[in-house]
Amino acid sequence: MSEYIIQIDHVNKSFEKGSRTKDGTLREGVKVLDDVNINIKKGEFVTFLGPSGCGKTTLLRLIAGFLQPDEGRILMDGKDITNVPPYQRPLNTVFQRYALFPHLDVYDNIAFGLKLKGGMTEKEIDQRVRKVLKMVSMTDYEDRDVDSLSGGQQQRVAIARALVNQPKVLLLDEPLAALDLKMRKDMQIELKEMHQKLGITFIYVTHDQEEALTLSDTIVVIDEGRIQQIGKPKDIYDEPVNAFVANFIGESNILDGTMIEDKKVRFIDKEFDCVDEGFGENTPVDIVIRPEDIYITKKLEVAQFLGTVKSCTFKGVHYEMFVDTDDGYELMIQDYNAFDVGSKIGMIIKPTDIQVMHKFGKNIYEEKEYACNEIELLDNKEDGDLHGKIRSIIYKGNHYHIEVQTSDRKIFYVDTQEIWDKGDMVGIKFLNK
């Protein structure tokens, strides 16, 4: 028997123009999943994480059987279930909208699936229902109307209704999205404990990075229908594979750099020792420094570089500061100590805290390659050689790095000092043609 309970094997999925996303937006006819491959072990808590529209819910619905892939296979315990209908798959789904039956009380909502399936006595059904009621801390609510329950209580009922069928896999589609912050954090703890008690596989969908880091054994980061990175939460946070992952997971300083040679890198106009190898010599790279990994010292003579505190904000556990370096770069720093605005500070970055990443993507237009600073964005889209929508914006210390996607889904990367908003429609003008 396979060690993996779920295998996603070269899955592709497209939606036709005019179909709708989960929030009701009309699609333009795009490929939402592009050659997706994932192996999920028995008993894992796996989270599909990505921005809205990245394909994570579509992938969950494919596993559930509500959609069919255009290409590829979905296997469960080594058996192909691609064409098996949802009701014959040993898994259950908890939706963002809990879909409880308002005319039934809590007990009957949970028991509904067992009664519909048949083959069980009333006593067996009662035992199962009471067991899951206890598991979700709802034993005193069995006779309550579901409409009288709070959002968190309704969510527990929805989870209990899914668990009472004893599925091998529980699918959860942003189940905490409708809850307030405190209740969401409480339910995160409860879900984690529930997973540990049950020992079954949880596959969870969210766009909340903190939620993913808190709950998961494994995180699958998805963007534009493609897997960006798969790994344990700490590995995803400490060692992102590209600028998208670094920017999406937690706070980051993402900077342009040059790998001078193995274990030697240059960024913010300074050279630093690092631990990375294999990038070649004088290779352009992206650098990630987490805000908590820049150490502040008042002894300016021992610092690697100097700067001036621009702002200092108390965040409850730490202070968040923005610092202008003497060479004209802005960095975010998190520290347990506050430093006065305007004060001069020294900064140190350890070699192990520097994450070096390959740059990805090239700008090719009419068979010529353009650097990121050889493209200009224009307010009037008709004035450009092409036009497109701004898909992402990353601040790189002294400029913005912008991804623009055209209507035929080509992506161009632009470095600019100008401030734009995500979603802006812009003209794309190629310089030095």
Image: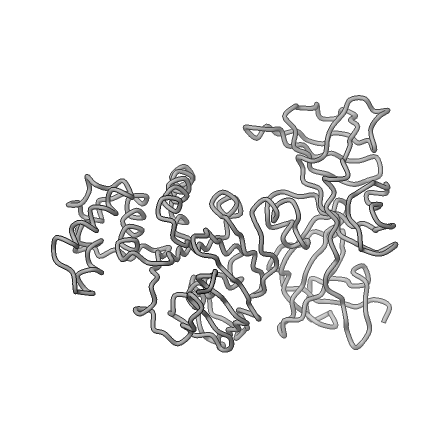
> Does 58 sit left or right of 238 as displayed?
left
Residue in view at x 37 percent, y 41 percent: 190
| Furthest residue toward front | 1
Q: Is residue 403 above or below residue 250?
A: below
Q: By what rule are the colours in the image chosen?
A: one colour
Dividing the picture into quadrants, the one containing residue 358 is bottom right
Q: Is residue 88 above or below residue 298?
A: below
Residue in view at x 30 percent, y 46 percent: 156
Dividing the picture into quadrants, the one containing residue 75 is bottom left
Which is nearer the eye, 291 or 325? 291
> Does 340 sit left or right of 173 as displayed?
right
Quadrant (top left, top right, bottom left, bottom right) of the N terminus: bottom left
Task: Give the mark count.
Answer: 0
Quadrant (top left, top right, bottom left, bottom right) of the C terminus: bottom right
Residue 269 at x, y = what percent?
A: 86, 43
Which is nearer the eye, 391 or 210? 210
Q: Is residue 433 above or below residue 204?
A: below
Which is nearer the eye, 13 or 388? 13
Which is nearer the eye, 41 or 54? 41
Residue 352 at x, y = what percent?
A: 73, 40
Residue 250 at x, y = what percent?
A: 60, 44
> Does 429 sit left or right of 139 as displayed?
right
